[in-house]
Each structure stands twice: as structure tokens, then as C-alpha cells.
Amino acid sequence: MQPATQPVTQLSDRVERISLSPTGAVLVAAERLQARGIDVVNFGVGEPDFPTPDHIKQAAVRALEQNLTKYTPTPGIGPLREAVCQWHRREFGSAYELPESVITVGGKQALFNALCALVNPGEEVILPAPYWVSYPDMIRYVGAEPRVVHTDPADGFRLHARQVEQHIGPKTRMLLLNSPNNPTGAVIPDEEFAPLLELCRARNLWLVTDECYSHFIYGGRKPFSVAGLPGAKSHVIVAGSLSKTYAMTGWRLGFALGPKPVIDAMTKLQSQSTSNSTSISQYAALAAVTGPMDSVRSMLGEYARRRAAVLESLAAIPGASCTAPEGAFYVFPHVAETPRLRSLRERNQPADTAHIAVDLLEEARVATVAGEAFGAPGYLRISYATSLDRIQEGIRRMGTFLSA
Ligand SMILES: Cc1ncc(COP(=O)(O)O)c(C=O)c1O
């Protein structure tokens, strides 16, 4: 008897347009090595290495004890929606009210649902590069195309309104901003946001601001949101997240703020997909946004020390160059001119950073993410959300590898 042939798996065009998140792939490879007892320095993870602060964990325990474990309203419990609006007002001077808010399953769902609610197939979204890995696939998933604006490393990867203006076409629907930026750590100057907002208003574009790293800004600068500017509310959607600010990545808690019709559309979508974000996480989030910010300040202090250490060690690697990040917890060194990559190119061997990141993990046991994933070949992303010792060890290994 002939063996039955495996049926060809027909997937939808939508899902065929996207791929698995490349940052996830690095983590899997690194974890596989670690499971074999191999010592890997993991610069791949994009999450704080600090525990969730105690008062937030205690609020979750209380929610459990009080059996607050049922469905909640789709857009979240009222006290949390109210508190998120007040938190955003206090931190950034915005003026959102409860009906202009929705609690989401992480910042990711806020971004995804905003794109689904506002962008049609065939339209375009302006995306500054280097960009966070998930944006292009989210845009393609809704049938739209990313219109990439390359920022200049010599200018600290900063985005300026005049660059955006040159990329606006008849199909442009949205500008997607992320400041502080993952992967570069670049921060859009506060004064640049007014012309960016003005441009969006004049050309009737949505301005989506991903504020995931809002509170990790160095040099004593205050966190900033374009949503706090006069006239912002009609064109701005805030995608917020508690993941990094309060070391709550696993709790899956984010939010969106924006005009009520958009929030209603996002809520409708959520009502037919995930429903509410986890009830226990919502009570924990309520404690986070109404509680003290000390833990946020102490994490920032620790990141600042690590940032200085990583920059100092990277500076000693011949041929590597690196813009000092102004925010987040990543550095994004350019490594294409290091001796190893130069010599590979001279010998016509693969010298793209996608290959280099794999070799770096296999040979030197350091996990990074290749610049290709962020629209910036020639770079490697290093997350310094790890201890000073590991940072020093990892950069030492990288130095040896890249100088070989
Ligand atoms: C730029 C950026 N936006 C959004 C997110 C999503 O965060 P979460 O869904 O955990 O809130 C991340 C996570 O790494 C990120 O780096």
C-alpha cells in the first residue's frame, strides 16, 4: 500500500505575508545552548532583568484572594482605565478621559489593533528605520506597505519632520513613531514632535506613538509624549505598555489612548479576539500606575551604569562604532568595519550581520540580534538588561570574535 501523502498546508495570504519574530528566534537558539549547559551571554532579550516590584505583585495576590478571576469588561476595569488616563496626564500633560482608553494585552496588541482599526489594504504607513522588528509585519498583515524612512547614524538616528514629509504619498495613512527607540536607543528631540504633529494634522495622517520605553531616558531629561501637545488628540494614538516601565513583561499589560471612535473600534476588535486583558494583571497594573515610581527610578539608575560600561567596552573593539543611546536599554553598534567582517568580505565569504550573529552565538556564545531584523544591516543589537559582569564578559567575547 502507498503511504498516504501529507496534505499541503494551505495557509492564508495574510499569514504568509509575515514571519516569526526574529528576536524570538535568537532567544530559542540561545536557550537551546543553555539547556545543554553551555554558558551563553544573552544580549538578545528585550526585557528588564529586574523583578516586578513587590507592591504590584501583592496587588495581584490580593486580586486572586478576592476571586477577581472572572471576565472583566472588554476595554478593561473602569478604575484602571481612569488611572491610566490620570497617569498619562501626570507624566506627560495629556488630557484623556476614560472613554478614550482601552486596556490591551501588552503594548503589542495596542499597536496591532490600532493598525487593524485604521489602515486599509493598499495603504502605506511611514516607518522610520532602524525600526522595532514587529512593525513591518504588523503593517503587512493588514495588507498595507511600510514606507521606510532611514535615519542617519551620524545624527544619532534622530528623526526630523522634513525627512517624513518627503515620504508622504497619496496612500499614506499613518506615521508610526517609537521614541526612545528599539533598537538604537535614539530619542526624537522634544522640539521635533511639534512639526511632526503639525505635518500629520496638515496631511491628515494618524500619528501612532509607541511609548514602550518612555521612562528610560538618560541625562536627566523628562519623559515626553507628543500626546501632551496642544491639538494632538484628534490625530494621535498612544500605544503604551507596562512591560518595561514596571518590569512586567510577562503580565501582558498595555493600553491605548486616542479619539473615542478609534478606541471603540479597537475595543470591538478585542471583543472578537482576546476579550479583556487578564483580570489579575489589571489589578496589578492598577497598583503600578497609582503607586510609587521609585522602582522605575532605580532601574533607570542601574541601566545608566550599564550603558556607560557597555559603551566603554565597545569603544575598545577595533572597527566597531556606536552612537550613544539616549534612552531604552539597547546599544546598536556598527560592526561591518571590524577586522573579522572585513577579512570575510575580502575572501568573498558571507559577512552580513545575519550570518555574523549566528556565528557569534555558535563560536563565542554571545546572543545578539542582527541589524537586518531592524532594517539596518551591518549592525548588531545588544540589550544591556543584564548584570555588569555579564556585560563585561559578553563584550570581551565579542571583541575577541570580531577582531579575529
Ligand atoms: C518598541 C516596542 N514596542 C512595543 C513592544 C511590546 O511590548 P509589550 O507587548 O510587552 O507591551 C516592545 C517589546 O519589546 C518594543 O520593543
Image (cartoon, rainbow, N blue to C red):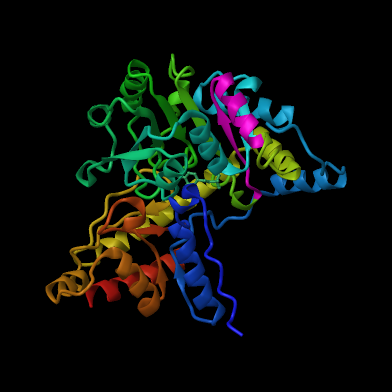
Quadrant in which residue 62 is drawn: top right
Q: Is 60 or 161 nearer to us in this picture?
A: 161
Q: Position of residue 207 (x, y in %)?
A: 41, 27
* Magenta region includes residue 264: yes
What is the x, y in percent for residue 329? 43, 51
Q: Nearer the viewer, residue 392 or 328?
A: 328
Percent x, y for residue 70?
A: 82, 41
- Which residue is farthest right? 66
Percent from the top left, x then y, of residue 278?
Answer: 72, 44
Predominant SS along the magenta part: helix
- Front-most of residues 97 and 108: 108
Q: Please name the residue shown 48% across and 55% down the image.
A: 46
Residue occupying the point 39% across, 73% down: 361
Instruction: Locate the N terminus and report the quarter of the image it occupies.
Output: bottom right
The magenta segment = 251-270
Residue 223 in sight from this viewpoint: no
Q: Is residue 383 above or below residue 291?
A: below
Q: From the viewer's perspective, is 279 left or right of 220?
A: right
Give the residue furthest to the left.
346
Residue 170 placement, left or right of 304: left
Q: Nearer the viewer, residue 276 or 177?
A: 276
Q: Residue at x 54, y 62 (%)?
A: 9
Residue at 83% from the left image edge and 47% from the top image edge: 64
Left or right of residue 395, residue 244 in this image: right
